[in-house]
Image (spheres, rainbow, N blue to C red):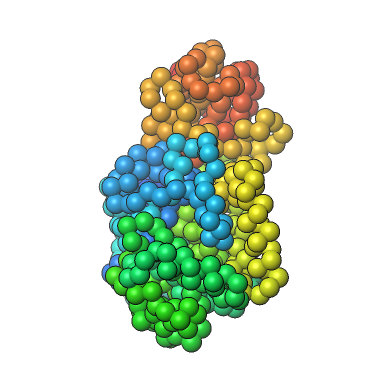
Amino acid sequence: MDSSQFTAEPSPSDTVERDFDVIIAGCGPTGAMLAAELRLHDVRVLVLEKETEPVSFVRIVGLHMRSLELMAMRGLLDRLLEHGRQRPAAGFFAAIPKPAPKGLDSAHAYLLGIPQPVIVHLLEEHALAMGAQVRHGCAVAGFEQDDEGVTVELADGELLRARYLVGCDGGRSTVRKLLGVGFPGEPSRTETLMGEMEVGVPQEEIAAKATELRETPQRFWLRPFGEGVYSVLVPAAGVSDRAQPPTLEDFKQQLRAIAGTDFGVHSPRWLSRFGDATRLAERYRVGRVLLAGDAAHIHPPIGGQGLNLGVQDAFNLGWKLAAQVRGWAPETLLDTYQAERHPVAEEVLDNTRAQTELLSIEPGPQAVRRLLTELMGFDEVNRHLIEKITAIGIRYDFGAGPDLLGRRLPDVDVKQGHLYGLLHRGRGLLLDRTERLTVGGWSDRVDYLADPTAALDVPCVLLRPDGHVTWIGDDQQDLADHLSRWFGKPTRRRGR
C-alpha cells in the first residue's frame, strides 16, 4: 500500500470524533499562527501539542521585518511589542557588523527580540481567543487519509477525524515521517553554543581581545547588545552532552580555552546549542496532509530566520486552506502553497549555508568573509542581504508585470489610517485610487477601499490576505479575471 496514503491503520471498530475541519500537529509559533488564520474564516480547528508544559529554557528569538508586518496585519503587533525589545535591522548576515541601510521600505524596520516562550504563549492565546481548540499532552501516532478526510490516531489510541491534517511538529516531525516524505540535505557537522549574557570587564578589553582573535582561526564572537548584555558564540566541541541544555559554565570553559579569559560572563538571559543540519522536505503536501515550519525545513539559526520562515508559511497557507475548506478555492489554489513557499525555503537554506561557511575558522572562508565585509560597505549589497534575511525582498511568481506584482505591499498611508489596519480580518483587499472599480460578486471574500489619496504610484492593486499584490491596473474585466484566479467564482450578491 502507498505510504503516502496510509500510516498506522486505526481500528474501524473504534469511535471516531468528526468535529474538525483541520487538525494541526504542533502548537509552536507556526501551528498556533496557522490555527488563528484558519479561525478567521470559521474553520473548525484542533491543535495537538505533545508537550504538557512550556519549554524550560528562555531563549530570545527575533521577529524580522516581514513577520512584524504580518503581525501588524492581524492586529497583534502592539501586544508583542509590550514583551519585546527593538534593535536595529543590522548585522544579521553572518554577524558581519554593518549598520542598517537607510530608508528600508517598511514601517517596521527593526528586529524585535522576544523570549520564545512568550511568543508561543501569545500566539496560542490568540488562537484560543479566535476559537481554536488546543490539547496539550496529545501526540500523533498515526493517520490514514482517504478522499473525504484524514483519520488521526493519538498515542493513547483515541481517533480523531478531520478534512485536513497539517504537520507543524518540528524538525523531527512525526507527521512528515509517517507521510513518507523525503527530507534530504546535510546532517550536522559542527555544533555551536550561543547565548546572551552580561560581562564583568570593560568593553575596551573585550574589543581588544576580539581584534586579537580575528587574526586566529577561531569560531568566536562577543557582540554588545547594549545595557551590558552581549551575544556570545563559541564552539560546542568538548562540553556537556548535546542532549542536555548548555550551562553558563560551558560558555566560561570555551571562552577560557579560546580567549584565555571568560570575560566575567554572568546573568545569562538565554543559552542554546545548535548544529548546522540543513534539510528541506521534498513535498509540502500529499493529498490532505500538509507540512509547515520546521517540519518542512531545518537550518542553522544564523541570521535568525527559522521562526520567521515558519510563521510566514502559516500566513501563506492559512487563507488558502480555509478557502479549500469553505468551498470557494480555485482548483489550483492550495497547490500554490508549495509552489511559493518551497523556493523561499530553498533560498533560506542556501543563505544559511553561506553564512555558516563564513563562520568557519579555515583560511578560505575567512578570506571570503573579509571580502564580503568590504562589499557590504556598498549600500546596494548591504540592502540586498538585509532584505533577503528579513524576507521583505520576496517576490512570488505571478507572471509578467510590474516589479510590484508578487511582492508584499508596505503599510502605506490610506484615508482610514494605515493599510495594514484594513487587513485584520484576513480577507483580500482592492485598493482603488480611480474610484471606478468594484469587487462585485467577490465582496464576501474581498474588501474594497476607494481612496485617490492612497500612497501608491499605480492606479489600483488587488491584495491577497497575506498582503501580496496579485494584480495592478485599472480595467474591470482584467480585475475580474484575477479575482477569479485567486478568490474563486463570484457569488450572486452585488456590491463593493
Residue 249 or residue 423, whichever sits in front: 249
Report if residue 317 is visible in the image: no
Is the residue 251 above or below the residue 84 in the image?
below
Is the residue 425 above or below the residue 25 in the image?
above
Residue 237 or residue 119, whichever sits in front: 237
Where residue 111 appears, as percent x and y from the top left, is: 43, 49
Residue 404 or residue 17, whichever sits in front: 404
Query: Which residue is found at the position 56% from the left and 48% from the top?
Result: 386
Q: Is residue 97 left or right of residue 242?
A: right
Q: Is residue 198 left or right of residue 413?
A: left
Report if residue 210 is visible in the image: yes
Query: Which residue is found at the position 41% from the left and 60% from the top?
Result: 224
Where residue 387 appears, as percent x and y from the top left, is: 57, 46
Query: Which residue is found at the position 57% from the left and 61% from the top?
Result: 94
Is the residue 193 above or below the residue 297 in the image?
below
Counting the numbered discs, the total is 0
Q: Quadrant of residue 261?
A: bottom left
Where residue 160 appears, as percent x and y from the top left, is: 38, 63
Residue 80 or residue 472, whichever sits in front: 80
Q: Is residue 126 left or right of residue 278?
A: left
Where residue 144 appears, as percent x and y from the top left, is: 50, 66
Q: If the image is split into quadrants, where does the N terminus sit?
A: bottom right
